[in-house]
Image (spheres, rainbow, N blue to C red):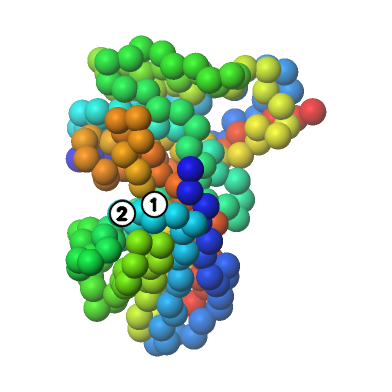
Amino acid sequence: SAVISQKPSRDICQRGTSLTIQCQVDSQVTMMFWYRQQPGQSLTLIATANQGSEATYESGFVIDKFPISRPNLTFSTLTVSNMSPEDSSIYLCSVGGLTRGYYEQYFGPGTRLTVT
Amino acid sequence: SQKIEQNSEALNIQEGKTATLTCNYTNYSPAYLQWYRQDPGRGPVFLLLIRENEKEKRKERLKVTFDTTLKQSLFHITASQPADSATYLCALNTGGFKTIFGAGTRLFVKA
């Protein structure tokens, strides 16, 4: 298994500003994922970040709004840009590994973002 | 449209009883199905996986069944304890690395 930390754990931000969330893994991993989880809702995949290539975004999410960096095999950042109250959510970093023939995912503790 | 449905109502049971949570899906052909546990303020934690050609999988007090005809998975916790209180997420994988999550069902186990 992998141990994942995220910073910050929570933040309250003003409308129109940006926040960068950091994700650190204790081992080298190929694939990292960024999810959003709104209260009472399921996890929604924002993008997949592989080291050395551009992130792949899911439908409804764009790079200008959620730029992602993946400078090495243990670290990634997600920026939430030009925030609005609709961006208030929990943002989760995850890593996946092809273990025993299937993809098992490990999640960070999440970043709780409130936009006022 | 594709949907994963879990009971949005919380499940309240007495300690020692068996908790049964349901996951139904439509318009998916999952290669495998996973169950995760999520505690407040924490990320989901992987519990169990069952493949499309398996009917049942067990791990300690946990049991998962998978009926691809009914498009349903059942998740059982036997001899439940207050420490089992959490939200349980069902997740589908249709092949590759992408996982689709349900919204989860909250379980409360009373002492």
Q: Identify the secondary structure beneath mark 2.
A: strand
**Residue A95, labelled with which disc?**
1
How much space separates mark 1 and mark 2, taking CA atoms? 6 Å
Give, as a three-letter code, the residue at label 2.
Answer: Met
Question: What percent of the width, then of the height, locates residue B28?
Answer: 22, 32
Residue situated furthest right in the rendering: B111
Q: What amino acid type is highlighted by mark number 1?
A: Val
Closer to the chain start, of discs 1 and 2, is: 2
Q: Residue at x 23, y 73 (%)?
A: A63
Q: Is residue B12 above or below residue A42?
A: above
Of the pair B82 and B59, the residue shown nearer to us: B59
* Disc 1 and disc 2 in contact, CB within 8 angstroms: yes
In the figure, is residue B107 to the left or right of A35? right
- The vertical placement of B67 against A115, above or below, is above
Q: Position of residue B40 (x, y in %)?
A: 61, 50
Is residue B85 visible to the viewer in this orientation of the structure?
Answer: yes
Q: Residue furthest top?
A: B55
Q: Is residue A64 left or right of residue B73?
A: left
- How far across and down, in percent of the image, does residue A107 sit? 47, 51
- Chain of the residue under the numbered disc 1 shown in the image: A
Q: Quadrant of residue B15?
A: top right
Q: Residue at x 20, y 28 (%)?
A: B29
Query: Label 2: which residue?
Result: A31
Q: Position of residue B5 (x, y in %)?
A: 37, 35
In the structure shown, which secondary structural element does the residue marked by tag 1 occupy?
Answer: strand
